[in-house]
Image (tube, rainbow, N blue to C red):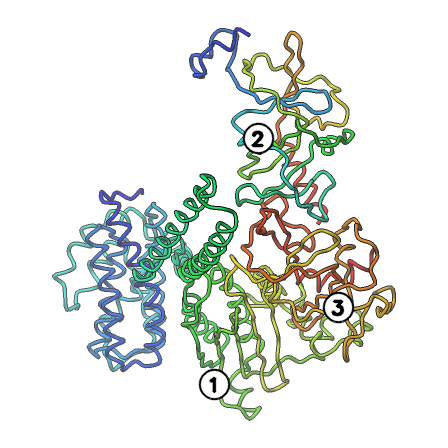
Amino acid sequence: MPIDCEDQELLEGFLAETTELLEKLDDDLIALEKASDDPELMNRIFRSIHTVKGASSFLGFDLLVRVTHKTEDVLNRLRKGELQLTSEIMDVVLEATDLVKTLVSDIKGGEIVDREINETINKLIPLLTEQPAAPAQPAAETPPLVASEDSPASTETAAPQPEQKPAQEPPPAAAMPPAAPRPAPEAAKKPAPPKGGEKGGDDLSDNTTVRVDVKRLDDLMNQVGELVLERNRMIQLNQDLQGGTSDHILFSEEFGKLAKRMSFVTSELQMQVLKMRMIPVEKVFKKFPRIVRSLARDLGKEVDLQIFGEETELDRSVVDEIGDPLIHLIRNAMDHGLETPDDRIAAGKQRTGTLILAAVHEGNSIIISIKDDGRGIDTDRVGRKAIEKGLITEDQLAAMSQREMFDLIFLPGFSTKDQASDLSGRGVGMDVVKTNIKKLNGLIEIKSEKGMGSEFILRLPLTLAIIQSLLVEVEGEIYSIPLASVLETLRVDQREFHVIGGQEVLKLRDMVLPLVRLEQVFNVKRCHEQDNFCYIVVIGSADKRVGLVVTRLVGQQEVAIKSLGKYLANVTGIAGSTILGDGRVALIVDPVGMVDGGEGASGTR
Amino acid sequence: MSNALVPMNANEARTGDHGELIQLVSFSLDNEEYGVDVLKVREIIRMPSITRVPNTPHYVEGVINLRGKVIPIINMRRRFGLCELEYDKQTRIMVMDVEGELMGFIVDAVSEVIRISSSEIQPSPAVVTSGIDQECIAGVINQAERLLVLLDLQKMFSQDERQLFGNL
């Protein structure tokens, strides 16, 4: 059924507000479970759902009104203390919230889908009649009560008799048509709505519109004003020069000043715009208490999730991308890391496991860490499994450092589980993490101690739009290397290079650094005379180091990343491109690709 | 050419057996004349400085900066397996819209915009100019003293992409 709403603006306002409220609601509900006696929190939850109900009844979204109305009633009883909050009740309330999200996302999609909502409503109804003395098992009692009803309409009117506010009942009951024609047996066959609900909930986090602080906008306007002034000045200078009222010496002096001011204004402007693109990482983090809660219940584990630094800001493009990897890491920590309460006590630990999710700024990157105090990574077991699955050979394993063994868990197809459950074991999750983080130019580091727990540390760039880079020249061609992965640069004599098994290496302090000649990887035509001296840019990804051999260092520059387009999206060793000051295009070297594929690339020459 | 006088409105142009009137940009490559739909051509520019992109097919000349946008450049001579020629004053890059993305194509020269009626397009004969993939030839236009090969670049690139990603 298409949405029949006269006032599009009203509808958009409703959607924006509802989405925001619902996002917060999830968070608050989980918090409520921990602190059920917090009246302030309770009231806030109640108000949110009430607002949603009010707005949707005003706009005539009947399905939404019915669900929110019942949920509100249950919350009202909780608020008044007529009902004691149990996790069973919370499950039902959360299910209802999910349903509301699904309905809202239907509306957002522009089409009201005739969804089955009675199953959830019927779970809510017994909570309205129950006595505070007897909490628990509401779900068990419900189904028989529902099954006897032939049509949803009769459920709606029959059940809420003992309710305190019957006066509010008629409108929703009268506005039944969308759901009424559906016969009850068919409805029963439908899969439970929460499944779709969880998905719908994710879709709700709409990132196409931004809310910007008015002050930030004013600042931006000021900067633009200054830019316009400088532009006028530039035109003036040009006219003076053309008209002969200014000579070259005066012009170059004035133009120098102008260039300085312009550069100042534009970098300010750039900061302002970047700031506007920044959103707190909370946007992603707030999904997790809910996920952790349901995972803990499914796995029969007790978990205390602690979140730190959710106010840390980062670019929205990054925020959009880190959700999935973080979910996989959390699942991994919950499933493989943390032990069951009994095992924990046996190991002399506290019954409840701790999962810490923290975000912090460090220079131009953000660091997100997921830390558990579970059993840690058993490298022997990981190694054995990897051999069993045919991912590595015995010899390879023997030569591995502990760190390399940790990295095995990122291999596609790797899993320590013998059988895949619906939660894990297919060997996909960690591969997803690695691929996504790599896509973001980020690094993953694993710290783990057997029996004590593990920590996954993600280091991500703050923004994907503009990066600091080192410009280098390779036989006349300019390439840009992201500064974040550059560890150091050296000028060395090529006679100091050693060759080990066909691989050129350099002894650098106490380590042996494999070298990659960019001119070979990129097939650059040699144009310079062979010079014994060259420059080496040491880059690192995770704990691997590689030295890139280049002809000359050009300098450090802040560059705006431009995509190479769909057609050239997957060029080996190239992460993107940028436009230099003279208008030419320079390619950005993909450091991760160099480090991972570096040995192969120089080996095949 | 009498057709040139027919107004561009497609409805009015659909008269008798003249068929629909279409406009083509004609360009030359190795002494042959080719045409592409004018609506796909965004602009025609002179040769700017091109940045080579390593590890790409040999006919990808590189990328250029088109007013702040980085777009790939394809060398049509190499793409069609023709012998290479030094760039001269006539050499142009035709910037075209290929499946929603801009791409540049280096051609020997761009001559004019011509109008033809769709009924003049004949299916291509079994063997056309050596080296050019049959798939991207949409037809030939045989007018009194000229022979024009009509190209469909979308086809060329869907085929290329398959190859490119197949190699990865």
Measured Cα–Cα span from mark 1 to mark 3? 54 Å
Measured Cα–Cα span from mark 1 to mark 2? 68 Å
- Where residue A45 sits in the image (x, y, percent)? 27, 70
Please say whether residue A77 is visible from this viewpoint. yes
Measured Cα–Cα span from mark 2 to mark 3? 45 Å
Which residue in the structure is indicated by mark 3?
A: A491
Which residue in the structure is indicated by mark 1?
A: A352
Query: In the picture shown, does residue B86 fall above or below A67?
Result: above
Which residue in the structure is indicated by mark 2?
A: B44
- Point out the frontmost of discs 2 and 3: 3
Q: What element carries label 3?
A: strand
The residue lying toward the viewer, choosing from A601 and A499, is: A499
Q: Earlier in the sequence, mark 1 or mark 3?
A: 1
Picture quadrant of residue A206: bottom left
Q: Is mark 1 on a helix, strand or loop?
A: loop
Picture quadrant of residue A445: bottom right
Q: Mark 1 lies on which chain?
A: A
Amino acid beneath label 2: Ile
The residue lying toward the viewer, choosing from A574 and A340, is: A574
Q: Mark 2 lies on which chain?
A: B
Evaluate if marks 2 and 3 touch, with contact meaning CB atoms under 8 Å apart.
no
The residue lying toward the viewer, choosing from A322 and A484, is: A484
